[in-house]
Image (cartoon, rainbow, N blue to C red):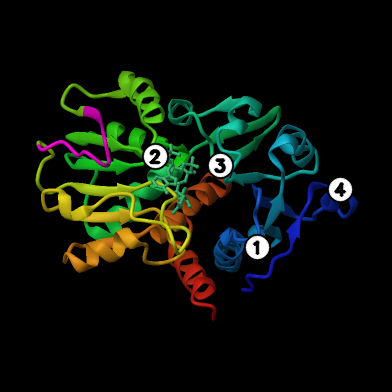
Amino acid sequence: MSHASPVLSVADLERTPPTGTPLAVLGHPISHSISPPMHNAALAVMAAADARFATWRYHRIDVPPEELPSALSRLHTLGFHGLNLTVPHKILACAHVAHIDPAARAIGAVNTLLRTADGWQGFNTDGYGLATGINENLGLALTGADVLLLGAGGAARGAAVECLTRGCRSLAIANRTRSTVDTLIHDLAPLVPATTTLRAVDPHALPADLPDGLLVINATSAGLKPADPSPIDLSRLPRPKAVYDMIYNPPQTPLLRDAARLGLPWANGLSMLVHQGARALALWSQRDVPVSAMQQAVQRVLGGV
Ligand code: NDP
């Protein structure tokens, strides 16, 4: 399966309307997205068992943020069955869906849209992808865990809601900008179970009472660029249980290099990418999804094979 699916615009699609059952990821920029080969690999396997899926095709569409509302309406008219949303659309799209899943409403962001008769229904599968990826790669559950979450942007919001709804024991959130994490803590307050403690911590002045055995989750974008610093100094923490970084490209960020140097179990966000995608495809298709085909496809693309 080729990674070279073209980057389309909505105008391209109006000139040459898609056939069959179209799906797509919308972002700006979008040329880096590896979701098309991942989903199309799964659809090829599904089509071998059920010919209905032979006409399903997943595209990537560049949509600038100011054009998102009209793009959602035009893609609905063009017959798109499902959409994924990535940076910078996940929060913006919430105001332009006809229906929203309660968990996505709590997060304040959607990454998956399902066609309904009167518009789009919004879901957020990122938290499921994170929890499943952590379990698969590190053998750990969020339930009962002591979590140190780095970041307070869109991905961190999804991660925090997932940690709370799965009943983590404690959740400490560290973010570079204090006001953003304070807003997040305020928004999360209604979701905190009686048995869970939630607090904001300063990434550069970590409190002395953080517990041993933390599960550290990086939801910042620090590490995407080669010169980025690690968002936290792992050696200043009581020995963590493991470190999960949502970033998967590069495959080993400075944070993960530090984890490896300290002998800690670590994993990157590739498993999250695969499982959030698998959950989206299950929502669209109402079928079991061949997750291993998706895993192989992303490894092939990132490995440059
Ligand atoms: P946002 O832009 O919404 O948030 C970015 C966060 O990173 C903010 O908390 C910001 O802090 C922090 N940050 C940025 N630069 C630095 C830095 N140099 N040092 C410390 N903190 C920094 O992005 P998202 O939440 O959407 O995405 C975050 C990351 O998660 C991205 O790398 C993205 O690729 C990844 N991701 C991976 C997924 C997967 O499937 N594996 C799915 C979704 C996201 P501040 O508030 O101070 O600006």
Q: Is residue 130 left or right of 29 when viewed as pictured?
A: left
Element marked by disc 1: helix
In this rendering, the answer to whether 103 lies above or below 38 is above
Give the distance between the C-alpha atoms of the residues marked 1 and 4, in whole angstroms: 27 Å
Residue beneath label 2, please?
156
Image marks 4 and 3: residues in contact by CB distance under 8 Å: no
Residue 254 pos. (x, y %): 34, 62
Q: Which residue is located at x 27 percent, y 41 percent? A: 203
In this rendering, the answer to whether 75 lies above or below 294 is above
Instruction: Give the residues drawn in magenta, as a range.
Output: 198-208
Give the distance between the C-alpha atoms of the residues marked 2 and 3, in whole angstroms: 17 Å
* Type of amino acid under label 2: Ala
Which of the two discs, 1 and 4, sits closer to the camera?
Answer: 4
Q: Which residue is located at x 52 percent, y 47 percent? A: 280
Element marked by disc 4: helix
Neighbourhood count class around disc 1 (C-alpha, 10 Å): few under 14, some 14–19, many 20 upward: few
Residue beneath label 4, please?
14
Q: Is residue 101 left or right of 73 when viewed as pictured?
A: left
Give the distance between the C-alpha atoms of the residues marked 1 and 2, in whole angstroms: 39 Å
Mark carried by residue 30: none
Mark carried by residue 51: 1
Neighbourhood count class around disc 3 (C-alpha, 10 Å): few under 14, some 14–19, many 20 upward: many
Q: Image quadrant for the C terminus? A: bottom right
Disc 2: residue Cβ within 8 A of ligand 1's nearest atom: yes
Q: Earlier in the sequence, mark 1 or mark 2?
A: 1
Element marked by disc 3: strand
Give the distance between the C-alpha atoms of the residues marked 4 and 2, in whole angstroms: 36 Å
